[in-house]
Image (tube, rainbow, N blue to C red):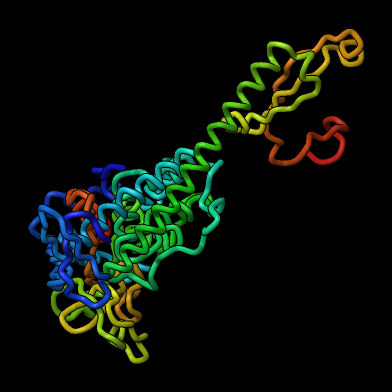
Amino acid sequence: MTQPGLVIDRVRPDIGAASVASPSRVEVGERDVRNALRRQIARLERESSAILAGAFPYISLADLPDFGRGAATGGPCLLTLAELERIRDHLAGQVQDLRRLAVRRVEHERRARELLDGMKLEPGRYKFVRLPVRDLGEGGCGVWEVRPRLGLIGMLAGWWHVKLSSGCPLPRGPRNLRGPGVGGF
Amino acid sequence: MSPDSSSAGREEPAAAELDVAELELGWRARELEQDLPELRLMIAQARVARIGSLRTRSPPGIEDRLRELSNRFRGARAVTVRREPVPAAYRVFFRQIGLDPDVVRTPIEAAALERMMRGGFLSGGMLEDVLLIALVDTGVPVWALDAEAVNGPLGIRASSEGEPLGRTAGAPPLPAGRLVVADASTALASLFGELAPGHRAKADTSRLTLFAIQVAGVPSLYVEQALWTCRMALEAP
C-alpha cells in the first residue's frame, strides 16, 4: 500500500516496506491505512451489491470466473493490513468483472430492442424469428415471434406479423386437451 | 427497511415501561475501540412472562405477525435487501472482519433466503419467532443468552489461542484472534455466529440477556427497536 507522500509506521512485521519520499512527507500510522482500506472495501461492496441487485437475474456471482475463491478468512477477526489489502483487491476485481458483465448485458438488451424494432417494422425480413422478452430485460416467459397471418395462406401471400406469446407455462402443466369432465377434476 | 413501531405480537404490552436507560452498552477491547470505533454491543435484560413458553408454539399474535411479515417480504425485496442501508452496513462490516457475506450470509439475508426457500417465515417456537420478527422489522439481528449462564457484563474482544467457546465440558476451542462476545471470564458466542452450547436459552429459562451488534451505518434507533421488540414480546403476559 504505497502512495506518493505516504510514510507508514512499520509497527508490525507483516507490513510491507512502504516509505516514499515526497515534498510533503505526510506521516500516516498503520491504523489510518487500515481505515482507508476499510472505506475502500465499503465502497466496493456497495457497488458490487448495486450491480447484482440491479441486474438480477441476468448477472450473478456464479458468472464470475473466480466465484467461490474469495479472500475471506476463517472467521470474524481484526484483519491485518495485508489481509485487508487482499480483500480489497479481491473485491476490486469482482466489481470490475461485474461492471464488464453489466455493460455486456446492456449491450445485449440494446441489440435485442433493435431486433424487435426491426421485426415490427419489417416482419417479412424476420420470418419465424423468436425473441424472448428476457432478452429485453423484462420479466416473464413471453416470446416475440414473427408469424404468418392466417397460417399457410399468410405464408404464401407474404402476410407476416409480430406476435407476443402468452407467457409462462401453467404451474400444473398443460391444460387437459380432452375437455372438462374427462379425466381428473 | 425501517423499524416498525408495532410490537412483535400486536399485544402492546406496557410499552411505556421500557426505557432507553434499560439498555446497556457492552464493553469493547481496546484494540477494537481503536480499530472499529463504531462497533457496539447493546444489551437488554428480559424476564420471560410465561416461563416454559420459549420453545413452545408462539401465541396467536406473534404467529399473525410472522404471517404478515411473510406477506410483506416477497421475492423482489429478497433480491434488493442487500442494498438497503442497514443490511448493506452489515454486509460491509462482514467484509471488514474477514467474512464473505456471499458465503457466510448476514442474518437478514439468511432470513430472506429461508423465506424464499420455505415460502414464508415459519414459526420455530416463541423465542425464535420473536428474534426473527425483530430481525425482519429492523434488519438488526438479536441473540438471546440464558441470563443465569452469564457471568458479569458482556463485551466484545478477540479470543486467545485454544480458549473454549462457553463454559461447558467439551466446549470447542477457538483460534487466536477470533472476535467473540464474552462475559467477564468466558467467550459466549462468536461474533455473528453461533452461541456457545450451554449458554443458549432453555425451554424453562426465566431471564434472558438479549444482545445486538451495532456497526457503522446502523442507527442506534434500529438497534434499540430490535431489542425492545424482543423484550415487549417476551415480557407480555
Q: Position of residue B104 (x, y in %)?
A: 42, 63
Q: Is residue B79 visible?
A: yes
Q: Which picture quadrant has residue A135?
A: top right
Q: Nearer the viewer, residue B133 or A153?
A: A153
In the displayed structure, would residue A156 be above or below residue B175? above
- Residue in view at x 52 percent, y 42 percent: A101
- Residue in view at x 61 percent, y 27 percent: A111
Q: Nearer the viewer, residue B31 or A2?
A: A2
In the displayed structure, would residue B134 be above or below residue B209? above
Q: Nearer the viewer, residue B167 or B165?
A: B165
- Residue in view at x 79 percent, y 34 percent: A175
Q: Is residue A5 left or right of residue A68?
A: left
Q: Is residue B114 left or right of residue B195?
A: right
Tell me the quadrant of the picture where the N terminus of chain A can be found: bottom left
Q: Which picture quadrant has residue B25?
A: bottom left
Q: Is residue B9 visible?
A: no
- Residue at the outermost left position: B21
Q: Nearer the viewer, residue B162 or B69?
A: B162
Q: Is residue A118 left or right of residue A35?
A: right
Q: How many marks?
A: 0
Q: Position of residue B60 (x, y in %)?
A: 38, 52
Q: Position of residue A98 (x, y in %)?
A: 48, 46
Q: Position of residue A70 (x, y in %)?
A: 45, 63
